[in-house]
Image (tube, rainbow, N blue to C red):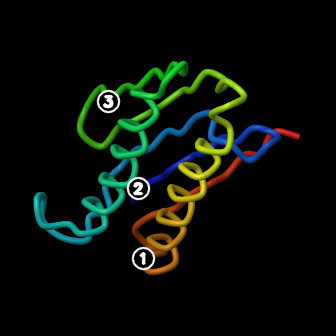
Amino acid sequence: MIEIRVRLDKLGCLQAFRASGHARAARAGEDIVCAAATVLLRTCAHLLSDGEGQTAAVKAPEPGELSLVLEPPPAERIEWLRGVTEFLLAGIAGLQSEYPDKLTMNIIEER
């Protein structure tokens, strides 16, 4: 199972995520659940690590592992980051809804 943990700040913006595991919905290289989760997470990580005035630490120490820790964004990037966050959460939630036995997402919100 793929386990994704997402941490959001008070404004609903992404602070960090950590994904680990494999869906095992099909053989390696043919697993659409793993492929979909990977595309969403890697695209998000790519966008945020290339952000203007923003720093992101991205690690993928081995297959099936990906994490991102994001520094607080500059004020002018908050709405953009909120949009990226909403896109990521909607995509992962859709996968979780369609494949509940293959992927789980836990969201931790800062209060």
- Residue 20, position as x, y percentages in the image: 40, 44
Three-letter code, disc 2? Ile
Judge from the rendering whether residue 58 lies leftward or rightward of residue 77; answer left or right: left
Q: Are marks 2 and 1 in contact (CB under 8 Å)?
A: no
User: What amino acid is found at the position of numbered circle 1 in the picture?
Assistant: Tyr
The quarter of the picture where the N terminus appears is bottom left
Seen at 54% across and 21% down, the residue is 54
Q: Are marks 1 and 3 in contact (CB under 8 Å)?
A: no
Q: Earlier in the sequence, mark 2 or mark 3?
A: 2
Badge 3 is on which residue? 60
Numbered label attached to residue 99: 1
Callout 3: SS? loop
Q: Is residue 73 above or below residue 78?
A: above
**Quadrant of the image containing the C terminus:** top right
Instruction: Name the residue tied to disc 2.
Output: 2
The residue lying at 31 percent from left, 63 percent from top is 36
Mark with earlier residue (2, 1): 2
- Determine the residue located farthest toward the right in the rendered image: 111
Number of the front mark, 2 or 3: 3
Q: CA distance from mark 2 to mark 3?
A: 15 Å
Q: Nearer the viewer, residue 17 or 3?
A: 17
Residue 53 vs 89, above or below: the answer is above
Estimate the x, y position of residue 74 in percent, counting from the top left. 67, 24
Q: Specify the quadrant of the image occupied by residue 19.
A: top left
Say what secondary structure mark 2 lies in. strand
Question: Outermost residue toward the bottom?
Answer: 98
42 up-or-down from 72: above or below: below
